[in-house]
Amino acid sequence: MTGNRARVDARDKVMGAPLFAADRVPDGLAHAALATATIDRGRIAALDTARAEAVPGVRLVLTRLGEDELRTAGFLMAGGYAFQSFQPLTSDRIAYRGQPVALVVADDPVAATHAAELVEARYEAEPHTVRIDDPGATVVLQQEAIPLPFLADVVVGDADAELAKAEVRVEAVYEHPSQNSAPMELIGAVVQWRGDTLVVHEGTQNAASIRHGLAHQLGIDAERVEVVSPYTGGGFGQKNSLQPHIGPLAIAARRLGRPVKLVLTRPQVFHQASFRPVSRHHISLGADASGRLLAAVHEADQQTSRHDLFPATFTEVTSRLYGVPAFRGRQRLVQTDVQTPGYMRAPFEHPGAWAMECAVDELAHAAGADPVELRLANDTTHDPVTGKPFSSRHVAECLQRGAELFGWAKRRPEPAQWIASDGSQVGWGVAIGAYPAASTPAVARAVAYPDGRFGVEVDGHEMGQGIRSAITLLVADLMGVPANRVTVGLGDTRVATQHLTAGSWGTSSALPAVHAAILKLRETLGGRRPTGAPVAVSASNEMPEPLQERARAGQVALAGPVWDDFVAYSFIAHFVEVRVDAGTRRIRVPRVVSVADCGRVASPVTAASQVRGGVVWGLGAALREGLEVDERYGGFVNATLEEYPVTVNADVARIDVEFIDRPDPLLNPVGVKGLGEVSMVGVAAAASNAIFHATGRRVRRLPITIADLL
Ligand code: MOS
């Protein structure tokens, strides 16, 4: 299909045409592999590399770099460029199991891998802590430890006093496990020097952080670093910054005078990259007899590492799901011996909304109210935290349309009363989700060619979410040409700054810049094709200058979701049916209905795909995914895709997706809000609530498995 609604790179991808980072095979390529720590905490007492160096084809074994040779790139959330501040290979410190202790480079990957296994390390181990409840874990109050306004506790009114007066009360603790993003494309890079310019091919969501982070680490000018990442095979937050092995790779490539490739193994991805940390949520709700919410308290603990405080913003979203007049949030961080955790799709919104939306279901049950009706009764047009109006909020329409599509009116209210003809218990659950609509600086360059083609280069990374399609369709629409006349340059520091694409702000940041550039181009062209030279113009999405400056320096620069005159969020409602087998207690999901409010739908095919993917993730969180920590050695026991079960086709039958598709009039001229993350927010709650409805069992710990229902 070449129509103006398709995923524009679908055919190319099916044909294997796009080059992902590790697909690059430059002349003289050498291959790297890592030797990794087998203890969780302590120091390296001795490293013997003799056997590794003796392997035929081995060219270099790097074990220690001077701190002046390779500086720390700093933690992304503390003004740096990397997912953690800790830089392996620059000291004898072991901060987590699986940390690299040596980088081996050889003529071929087999020799490199074999040699890495022959590196012999002797450690001095220290006691380590892997669980947030272990005595060795250190608990800090987030708003004291990181005194930044957006990380402070959310407090509106006197929630505790209101709770005490409430006629209906619910109080419960919900436990969410750690998880790994596990994108299909393994983390990897091809790094090479072209003269004194460092060229990095890596699948990333943040080419700017790699560029500026490497410049900082190596003490070179950022102008001397090029990062090329036109396609990323899934990021989900795990590829949001400079990875710690890139600096050592650059040094190895310089010493050898050859390009070097490193692809982490799947277990290394689990142990060396960021992950969704463990979190625990203590929720208290108070309502009047009808279920109208009067107060909510959300106290959350989130795991972090010893070396970084990965901040939590659970209460930013849970305080805004409903028009609750009194709210108290409190967030604590719990330090354990692990690599720094990080952002994984809907990092706070998914766990936070899971807990809150399960509690709301418990409230509906306690109040004897229908879960959809109770949610509608607690809807709001204004943000309860700031009092500002929402730029657009179609929660009620999402719930009403979803209920209609799902057939919610036929639900039997009492739990554990509905048996299908095969004897399985049937349950229907509902939940809503919300996700902040932030924007980041974006600059677009638009070019008209004499032959009728158009090119656009813009800030943004294509990680499969469909940003290239959304941009192409906008340009094709505005210029009145077929999509195949439009090419889009993304993820490349040679064509734009390439600020981090994450937080569901990619499309809503890039499109307004592209929109402005195309309008300017149309005006410049005056309805005519260029004759002779192509015509090029540039425009931005007009973020404040200080933000643009931060972006140009490779740092995270965000505006929203609280804007001057409004608060902007995307919303969604999910309806899930479960069937619980009478004998085995196996949980099946025959169907899901999801209705999303993401403003204007910029690219219908990829948007629907985003939502289906988000639903699959949410079901994975509800029923499958969870990291098992290794108490003996630290790290994770199930660090492979065989043992870390993700949802597969056989787990999900039917997912129906609809959009409200009403442009957000205030957020930006194109009217788009984000979609990638809101799509999974609330899914796990709807599934958990459906399991309660099917069985009468309220399970407050994910994933919910057969063992919970025996
Ligand atoms: Mo996403 S977790 O904001 O890359």
Image (cartoon, helix red, strand yellow):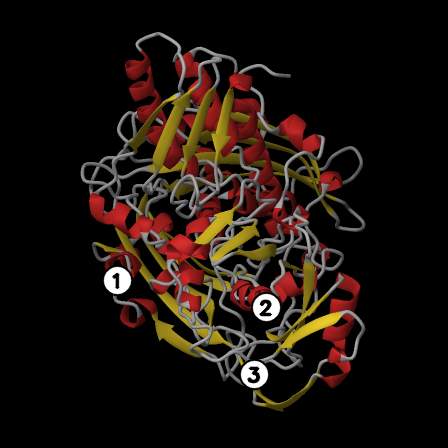
Q: Position of residue 611 (x, y in %)?
A: 54, 34
Q: Residue at x 36, y 74 (%)?
A: 140
Who is closer to the viewer here, 139 or 425?
A: 139
Disc 3 crowd rating (10 Å Cα; few below 14, some 14-19, many 20+) is: many
- Mark 2 sits on what residue? 252
Q: Position of residue 627 (x, y in %)?
A: 63, 63
Q: Measure the alpha-carbon separation of dots 1 and 2.
A: 39 Å
Q: Secondary structure at mark 1?
A: loop
* Viewer can see residue 450: yes
Q: Position of residue 252 (x, y in %)?
A: 59, 68
- Mark 3 sits on what residue? 41
- The residue type indicated by label 1 comes to Leu
Of pointers 2 and 3, the one earlier in the residue sequence:
3
In the image, residue 654 above or below residue 79: above
Of pointers 1 and 2, the one earlier in the residue sequence:
1
Q: Residue at x 70, y 54 (%)?
A: 645
In the image, residue 63 above or below residue 407: below
Q: Residue at x 27, y 39 (%)?
A: 567
Disc 1 crowd rating (10 Å Cα; few below 14, some 14-19, many 20+) is: few
Q: Measure the alpha-carbon separation of dots 3 and 1.
A: 30 Å
| Residue at disc 2, CB closer than 8 Å to ligand 1 | no
Q: Secondary structure at mark 2?
A: helix
- The residue type indicated by label 3 comes to Arg
Of pointers 3 and 1, the one earlier in the residue sequence:
3
Who is closer to the viewer here, 141 or 531?
A: 531
In the image, residue 498 above or below residue 603: below
